[in-house]
Image (cartoon, rainbow, N blue to C red):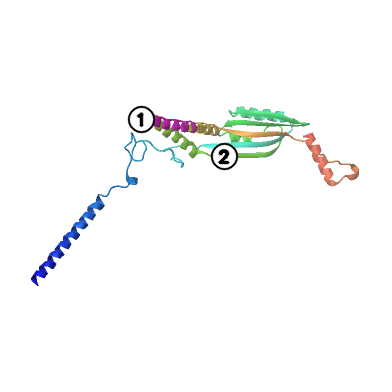
């Protein structure tokens, strides 16, 4: 009986030792398991960090606008206008508008005179310094008998303007950084890789500079498209009025025509 008890105790002890050893082995296996290929970090290649890019190089500019520079900023607007005028003398009206444009420090951008039979009209475009648009539009040119259309449009581009300036500065800094890295290249492959980045950034920089120049031009002055037409249009069919068919409406028409001729 005592012998059997000893055997049971010995077997139980061996089982406990075996279980303890298995648990430790599993723990060690879990802690020291090899990493999967996807978890490996790069950075072994020349000049690259863990992200596969070069250290200190900012990725391409995001699509969202960059924050505006701190402090006081000048708001930027694109303001333009349109005028459609009737005139008893389209040439004098044109001269009057041209003189006004020069007085405001502007310029005549384009001028065209067209004729169709007895009908003449002038189309022109003028540009005045920003802030002078209202003064130009409120002025009454000589010999104008009717303002058929007057339109002013305004669009704020402050955010777009300063965002473009910030992107230009960032791109220039990136190009400078890549050029400094170019001097450290040790192989042809490394040189070509860095030069490709420089070429791409240079194209982006030129595009940004062109956009900034356009915004500068559009916000520096306002343009007004003007059409000047004759007061009366001979091509419009005139009503035939005879004494035999005279009506009160015909009397009003004759009086209006007489006033226009006298004016």
Can residue 243 be found in the magenta stretch?
Answer: no
Residue 79 lies left or right of residue 121; in this view the side is left
Distance between mark 2 and mark 1 Cα atoms: 46 Å
Let me know if residue 110 appears in the view: yes
Q: Position of residue 174 (x, y in %)?
A: 40, 33
Q: Position of residue 139 (x, y in %)?
A: 64, 34
Residue 222 lies left or right of residue 18; in this view the side is right
- Image quadrant assignment for residue 43: top left
Binning the other alpha carbons within 10 Å of mark 2 as few (below 14), some (14 to 19) or many (20 upward) gives few
Query: Which numbered tag is attached to residue 154?
Result: 2
Give the vertical position of 228 relative to 9 (above or below): above
Q: How many marks?
A: 2
Residue that extends furthest to the left in the rendered view of this protein: 2
Magenta highlight range: 192-207
Helix, strand or loop for the magenta stretch, by majority: helix
Let me know if residue 172 appears in the view: no
* Element type where label 2 sits in the image: strand
Residue with the mark numbered 1: 181
Query: Which numbered tag is attached to residue 147?
Result: none
Of the pair 254 and 223, the residue shown nearer to us: 223
User: Quick one: quadrant of the N terminus?
Assistant: bottom left
Q: Mark 2 or mark 1, which has the lower sequence index?
A: 2
- Image quadrant assignment for residue 169: top left
Residue that extends furthest to the right in the rendered view of this protein: 244
């Amino acid at each position: 009986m005592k012998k059997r008890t000893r055997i049971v105790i010995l077997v139980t002890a061996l089982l406990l030792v075996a279980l303890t050893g298995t648990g430790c082995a599993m723990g060690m296996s879990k802690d020291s398991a090899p990493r999967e290929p996807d978890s490996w970090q790069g950075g072994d290649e020349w000049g690259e960090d863990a992200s596969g890019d070069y250290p200190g190089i900012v990725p391409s500019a995001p699509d969202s606008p960059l924050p505006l520079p701190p402090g006081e900023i000048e708001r930027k607007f694109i303001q333009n206008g349109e005028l459609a005028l009737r005139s008893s003398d389209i040439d004098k009206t044109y001269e009057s508008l041209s003189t006004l444009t020069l007085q405001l420090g502007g310029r005549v951008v384009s001028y065209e005179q067209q004729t169709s039979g007895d009908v003449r009209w002038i189309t022109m475009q003028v540009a005045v310094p920003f802030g002078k648009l209202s003064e130009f539009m409120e002025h009454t040119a000589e010999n104008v008998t009717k303002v058929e259309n007057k339109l002013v449009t305004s669009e704020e581009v402050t955010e777009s303007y300063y965002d473009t300036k910030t992107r230009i500065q960032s791109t220039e800094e990136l190009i400078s950084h890549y050029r400094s890295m170019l001097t450290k290249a040790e192989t042809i492959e490394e040189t070509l890789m860095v030069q490709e980045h420089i070429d791409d950034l240079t194209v982006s920089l030129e595009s940004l500079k062109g956009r900034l120049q356009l915004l500068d031009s559009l916000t520096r002055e306002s343009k007004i498209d003007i059409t000047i037409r004759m007061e009366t249009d001979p091509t419009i069919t005139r009503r035939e009025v005879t004494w035999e068919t005279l009506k009160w409406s015909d009397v009003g028409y004759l009086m209006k025509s007489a006033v226009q001729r006298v004016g």
